Amino acid sequence: MVHIAGQGRSQLLLLPDSVDDYVSPENPVRFIDAFVDSLDLRRGKGPCW
């Protein structure tokens, strides 16, 4: 049986401390994030609510 070597178990973080480390300031996903944050999702009247 072949052993597959992976990362060491002493690794502290899988991802950076913040998603901001991945997303540049001019990335369009920041607009989408701000838009979704502005929605009042508690008043939803969709079929799943």
Image (cartoon, rainbow, N blue to C red):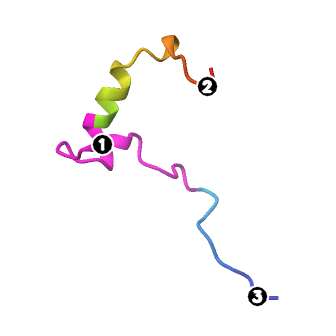
Q: Give the crowd class for mark 3: few <14, some 14-19, many >=20 residues within 10 Å.
A: few
- The first of marks 2 and 3 along the sequence is 3
Q: Which residues are magenta?
A: 11-31
Q: Gap between marks 2 and 3, in whole Å?
A: 50 Å
Name which residue lies at 17% across and 45% down: 26
Residue 9 screen position, x and y as percent: 64, 59
Mark 3 and mark 1 lie on one chain; the one further toward the N terminus is: 3
Residue 30 in picture, x, y percent from top left? 27, 37
Question: CA gap, disc 3 to disc 1?
Answer: 41 Å
Q: Nearer the viewer, residue 24 or 29?
A: 29
| In the image: residue 36, left or right of residue 46 | left
Of the residues under marks 1 and 2, which one precedes in the sequence?
A: 1
Figure quadrant of residue 8: bottom right
Mark 1 sits on what residue? Answer: 29
Outermost residue toward the right in this view? 1
Mark 2 secondary-structure assignment: loop
Type of amino acid under label 2: Pro
Instruction: Give, as a three-letter code, the residue at label 3.
Output: Val
Crowding at mark 2 (Cα within 10 Å: few <14, some 14-19, many 20+): few
Q: Quadrant of residue 47?
A: top right
Circles 3 and 1: CB atoms closer than 8 Å: no
Which residue in the structure is indicated by mark 2?
47
Please say if the residues under marks 1 and 2 sit with CB atoms less than 8 Å apart. Answer: no
* Pick the front one: 45 or 11: 45
